[in-house]
Image (cartoon, helix red, strand yellow):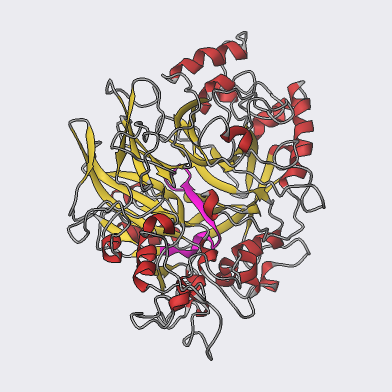
Amino acid sequence: MSKATQDPKRYNHSSNTPFSRVLEKEISRRSLLKNGAGLAALTMMGGFGLSACSDDNDSDNSDEGQALSTRLGFESIAGSRTDAVSVPPGYSAQVLAPWGTPLNSSAAAWQDDGSNSAEDQLNAVGMHHDGMRFFPLNDSSTDGLLCINHEYIDQNALHPTGPTRDESSGLRTVAEEIRKEIYAHGVTVVRIQKSAGRWSVVTDDEHNRRITGASECDIAGPLAGHADLITPYSPNGLLARGTLNNCGNGYTPWGTYLTCEENWPGYFCNHGTMSEAQQRIGLSSEPTRYGWEELAGDASETDDEFGRFNVTPLGSDATADYRNEANGHGYVVEIDPYDPTSRVVKRSALGRFRHESVAAALPIAGKPLVFYSGHDSRFEYVYKFVSAADWDPTDADRSDRMAVGAKYLDEGTLYVARFDEGGTGQWLPLTPASPTTDGGTLADTFADQAAIILNTCGAADLVGATPMDRPEWIAVDPLSGDVYATMTNNTARTGDDADNGVNAANPRLDNAYGHIIRWRDDADDATAMSWDFVVFGAPDDADAGTNLSGLTALNQFASPDGLVFDDRGILWIQTDNGAEAVTEDTNDQILLVIPAELVDSGNDTALINADNQHILRRFFVGPNGCEVTGLAYTPDNLNFFANIQHPANWPYSDDAAEATPDGTSVRPRAATVAISKDDGGEVGL
């Protein structure tokens, strides 16, 4: 999630045990483990990292870690604060598919004065790139489809002089500007090809497609056809309009793209009495983020395209107003990139909240599929969905991919995580029969499963889930199946009252730097897991009580956000830093580490620590003002793609590493950066 869209307000006011309370006792437990007590118990719970130890029991762990570190084929690069990207020597970085790039002949070329029309934007790459995935065509690594999320917009860059407002009222006045903003949201599917070492967009390709904030989407799963989805536009409750604030992403074993709706509540307003579910998710009576509802009733408006963002009950029932419009948002959305005629589907069974990303566990034939997702907000939760259907590997080759999605994503059990002491945890089911902490069941509060989904986080409050520090991206290790998740930060963790605890996921108040955790589900019990710590963000000059992973100037970071494993088991960590102690030295960045090469030495706090931190290496730094978001790669690992969101004064040329000259201003454009090795080798090795 971009810092620009973060909602700092706390919406979880439950008294569930905060993660910091668990951590305090866990630190004490691990001190015992370091001295030998309880090691057998840790191994039985999963023994994270122990499988990576040498077969030679006499070897020294720190020496072994040093030797294994050579498998990353680059040295950590220095931090950077320039209007350019930085990559290691021997690498090149190309600007690809920046905002406004035409997808077809219906869009005019991008204009650097912001004068492109709404129709141009509807047929061009969207704004503020985020999560993405490369889908090869004919198994090619030089020809494929790039699916790109577009999280939000910059109105000042999108329009020549920003949004037009009435001087006296301050309200929006130009409908075409609002349409352009709505069209700049959503997802882009674009065909790209590589020739003579350069990537390019294939204009007018049949696969090129925009799913925007106005695109019609189907609702599937428990909420399909539900009374709380009825609107004047969809009187049967089966349709939603648009997908908004698309942040992280995921993909399925059958070849579809999953995009996640994150900070969507800010697009809607309710000036009347809000429901409990609306209050819990963060809807407001305040004006919306961009003021789209202000042009309701405009002479050019069709199908209440602007008025629908005002969800105040105004009529006699849901067919007379848009009280339920926001209920069509907050989901994991499935898209088939290979079939441009296919419908876009919101899979409600995976829960309704501020989804940051979604990650599929390693599929096992004859076992249910599992998908994980985090709710990116302070004191919120981690979730998983377990399909009712068992995985059939032949479904991976079916051409009716959306039907396969319905098979696995529309029926199943949604769980929320409780992280217990001793490195164990429980997945708590969110079903009507689920027990609540007050001795009742969810059926005492919710009429049915659809009602639980509609207020997923409210149900999670009642069963006793563990409040976390802004769970963002989740990634699954392709070698071990372990699940990794970023906890970006939580500066509201003050310890002033019982709900706040004393710390987030380490023994420090005011978690400004964030951390990464991991867990392993029990192979035989879907409700059991074991968990551990991976790394703690910190500035390199912080004291030992803060810099628990012993980071140096070459790998210091804060606010871990994007998290992706490539197929080789390399973990790519992207940051959305808001901590001045780090930003004064470097812009947002990507760090690489190979978890399978790390040896768990029984350190008190994290897998990455002062003894082996050199294995965590800075690979990429973005330009000034940006967030580095999203990651994709080609099947041969020769090409990697990272997104640059909201740069300050970039890009200057197609060479992403060419700095904008001093004194030169460019209209900033979010863009994908294609990264390759000059010698044609695998990226990162």
Using the image as rendered, state which of residue 304 and residue 401 is in the foreground: 304
Q: Is residue 216 visible?
A: no
Which quarter of the rendered picture does the C terminus lie within? top left
Find the residue positioned furthest to the bottom: 316
Query: In percent of the image, x 78 and y 53: which residue is there?
Result: 499
- Can see residue 423? yes
Q: Quadrant of residue 457?
A: bottom right
Residue with the most extreme top position:
58
In the current view of this chain or complex, which residue is farthest to the right?
Answer: 497
Q: Is residue 169 above or below residue 40?
A: below
* Magenta stretch: includes residue 350: yes
Q: Answer left or right for 12 relative to 301.
A: right
| x then y, percent, for residue 279 | 64, 69
- The reply, left or right, for residue 3 in relation to residue 602 is left
Residue occupying the point 59% across, 48% down: 471
Q: Is residue 663 left or right of residue 653?
A: right
Provide the residue span drawn in magenta. Answer: 346-367
Q: Nearer the viewer, residue 317 or 163?
A: 163
Q: Does the stretch in magenta take in 170?
A: no
Number of numbered callouts drawn: 0
Residue 226: x %, y % from top left = 49, 77
How far across and how far down the image is residue 411, in percent?
A: 47, 62
- Up-down: is 324 above or below 62? below
Residue 428 sits in which quadrant?
bottom right
Task: Where is residue 147? Give x, y as percent.
Answer: 33, 50
Report the residue at 60% width, 70% height from top.
284
